[in-house]
Amino acid sequence: MKKTLTLLIALTFIATSYSQAELMGFRDYRDIADSFYMNFEGSDKFNVEDVNGTPFLGEGFEYGYIIDTKGKNKSQTFLRYDVYNDIFEIQLDPNDESLKTLERTPRFQYTLNGEKFVLIQTDVLNDAHYTSGNGYAVELTSPEANTVLYKRYYKELKPGSKGATSYQPDVPPSISSNLVYIVKLGDSYVEAEDHKKKILDAFPSDKQGALKKFIKAKGFKLKGSDQEVQNEMIQIVRYYNSI
C-alpha cells in the first residue's frame, strides 16, 4: 500500500510546494496555462476558444494512471492529453482548477482510455510546429521485442482568413486531427504508412517478400476504421518479429 501511494504523495507535493516536489524528483517543466494558447508562424497567441476544433485528445479530464517506471508503481489521477503541445495535464482533484505536469522523461508513462503513452526519442516525431526530437506515442506491441509499433497522435493548426468583402464571413483558425504509425527497428525509428504496399518500405528489403505474402494471405487492406487498421498493423509487426 505504501509503495502504491508514493507517486500520489509526490503529485500532492507538486500542487503545494515546488521545493518539496524537487526533493521528490518531480518538477513542473512549463507553465501549464500556456497550453491553452498556440503559436502559429510567429503570430500573436490566440485563445483556443477562438479556434474550431480542439488541441486535446479528449476535452474533459478522465481517470487515468501515471506510471513511475523507476519506482515501479502507478497512481490513478485525472488526466488530459494536450496533443498539440504534447503535454499531459494532471488534475489532482476534479474541483481544483490548478493543473500540473511532470518532467518529460521516459521514466513517466501514462495510461489513458486504455492506451499506454510512452516518451520516445526520435526526430521522426517532428513536424511544422513541434521540433523537440522526442514525444509521447502509444505503445502498441511489446517493448521487449526487437521491433516495436507505436501510434502517434497529431494536431495541426490551420490559419484562418479574413473575408474578401464585407459580405463574406471570416474563416477562423481550425485544428485538424491525424495519427501516424512509427516502427522502431533496433535503435532506429521510421514512419510506417498504413497502406498495404507502402508499409513494406518501413522494413528491411530482405524481409519485404515474406511480409507481402503474409499481408496477402491474411487479406489485409489496411482500410476501414482506425481500430481495424491498427489491429492489422499490430499483426504485421508481430509477424515481422517472428521471421
Image (tube, helix red, strand yellow):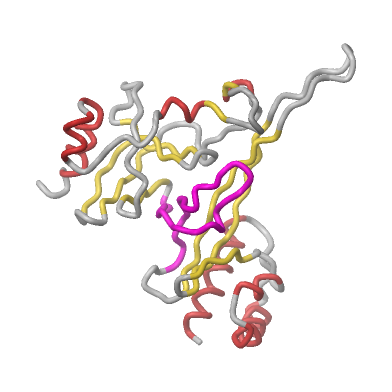
> What residue is drawn where x is 36% and y is 72%?
144
Q: Position of residue 27 (x, y in %)?
A: 28, 37
Reply above or below: 239 against 174. below
Q: Nearer the viewer, residue 42 or 182?
A: 42
Task: Report the side of 80 relative to 78 (left or right).
Answer: right
Task: Report the side of 74 relative to 173 (left or right).
Answer: left
> What residue is drawn where x is 58% and y is 23%?
45
Q: Is residue 137 magenta?
A: yes
Q: Is residue 121 magenta?
A: yes
Magenta span of residues: 114-141
Q: Nearer the viewer, residue 183 or 18?
A: 18
Q: Position of residue 185 (x, y in %)?
A: 49, 73
Q: Position of residue 177 (x, y in %)?
A: 63, 43
Q: Nearer the viewer, residue 115 or 175?
A: 175
Which residue sits furthest top?
166
Badge count: 0
Q: Nearer the viewer, residue 13 or 214?
A: 13
Which residue sits furthest left?
2
Reply above or below: 192 against 43. below
* Image quarter of residue 25: top left
Which residue sits furthest front?
42
Task: Report the side of 224 relative to 27 (left or right).
Answer: right
> What residue is drawn where x is 61% and y is 62%?
229
